[in-house]
Amino acid sequence: EKEPVTILITGAAGQIGYALVPMIARGIMLGQDQPVILHLLDIEPAAEALNGVKMELIDSAFPLLKGILATTDVAEACEGVDVAIMLGGFPRKDGMERKDVMSKNVAIYKAQASALGQYASPNCKVLVVANPANTNALILKEFAPSIPEKNITCLTRLDHNRALGQLAERLNVFATDVKNVIIWGNHSSTQYPDVNHATVSTCRGQKPVRQIIADKNWLDTEFIATVQQRGAAIIKARKLSSALSAASAACDHMRDWVLGTRKGTWVSMGVCSDGSYGIEPGLFYSFPVTCAKGQWSIVQGDCAPSTIFMWCMINLRNFISSSIVTMAGLKIDEFSRSKMDATEEELKLERTLARSCLNTQL
Ligand code: NAI
């Protein structure tokens, strides 16, 4: 039998936590052969509810669950963890300014970064779910220098899955028939759900979504808006924000990261930019990634000879006209470029705001 993996879940007494812990304990995140130990963290006012979750986990007698720690002590919670799922955060309440929410959350992520850096296992993989997810991840990276930057990610898989779901509904096919959509940028309403490289399986093989859905207008307007605003639509319907789909997406994200993506398929993950696609290095931005051997890498084009040829031609032309040299990558048209830039701009503003919040807290 494999050694158990220790998984930290912060904010475990909350909504997503309640949906996520049974999924993990049933092996949906790390596999049916992987025993787990759960470290559940929440804050003092939620301590009793947290203990209730622990009681229900005991009552479920999950075969893969080899230990449960429920605590309000951050250091104890982070001790020896191999995977950290960060759901804990301060929700936006009526009348609160954006800056106030940001200020509360970056303070939490700064404190938890230090605890993870000090007590977690050196190769701990971190997934930030709590909003503002990308900026929380950025703060976590800045205050946990001992955690490799490639081990810190944030969740945009829910948006990715929502895009797959919308296309499958429209085409009246299964979600598994659609693949390779991309969520670019921030987990916010400026995110850009891109279908330009997405395909659908048909009886005549894989076809580009753009070829199968002829209604360009729907793809360029309604589809994008529906995915961007799906979170708000769920709140309106449920009077509560997405929880089961968020928990399921967190499992998908970690499973693919640890166990690898399927051949020919990529997924969206918020990761620290290395400058790919012209996105400022250091920003946490959602990119298309493939994963193998526990590592993600940003998709850099399909390397078909025709793509390489095109890339050389474009760079040659750019070189001659002395403009910026294009990165080798998926082809990005002007429409996509402007949307990718807009969401990058928002992330830069969030970073400025987050840093100013931390400075005033010093
Ligand atoms: P929730 O409010 O039900 O649960 C949050 C939990 O965090 C609460 O139990 C709270 O006591 C706890 N908490 C607050 N401060 C903490 C701290 N310093 N340490 C540990 N725990 C702390 O919220 P819900 O619905 O479970 O959502 C969790 C987060 O995920 C929210 O920030 C939400 O906006 C975000 N979210 C992100 C999505 C994504 O796709 N990235 C999708 C859906 C939600």
Image (cartoon, rainbow, N blue to C red):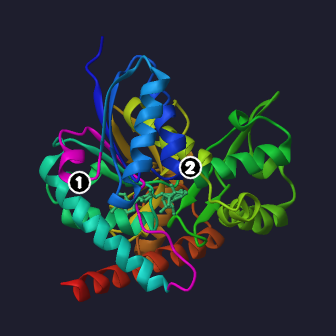
Earlier in the chain: of badge 1 and badge 2, it is 1
Q: Residues within 10 Å of mark 1 (few under 14, many from 20)?
A: some
**Looking at numbered disc 2 in the image, what kind of residue is underneath it?**
Ala
Whether label 2 lies within 8 Å of ligand 1 gets the answer yes
The residue that appears at 42% across and 27% down in the rendered structure is 58
Q: Is residue 109 above or below residue 46?
A: below
Q: Residues within 10 Å of mark 2 (few under 14, many from 20)?
A: many
**Looking at numbered disc 1 in the image, what kind of residue is underneath it?**
Val
Q: Which residues are magenta?
A: 71-96
Percent coordinates x, y for residue 312 in the rendering: 46, 58
Q: Is residue 196 above or below residue 236?
A: above
Residue 133 visible to an observer of this rendering: yes
The residue that appears at 61% across and 68% down in the rendered structure is 336
Q: Which SS class for mark 1?
A: helix
Percent coordinates x, y for residue 310 in the rendering: 54, 56
Q: Is 269 one of the magenta-colored residues?
A: no
Q: Quadrant of the N terminus?
A: top left
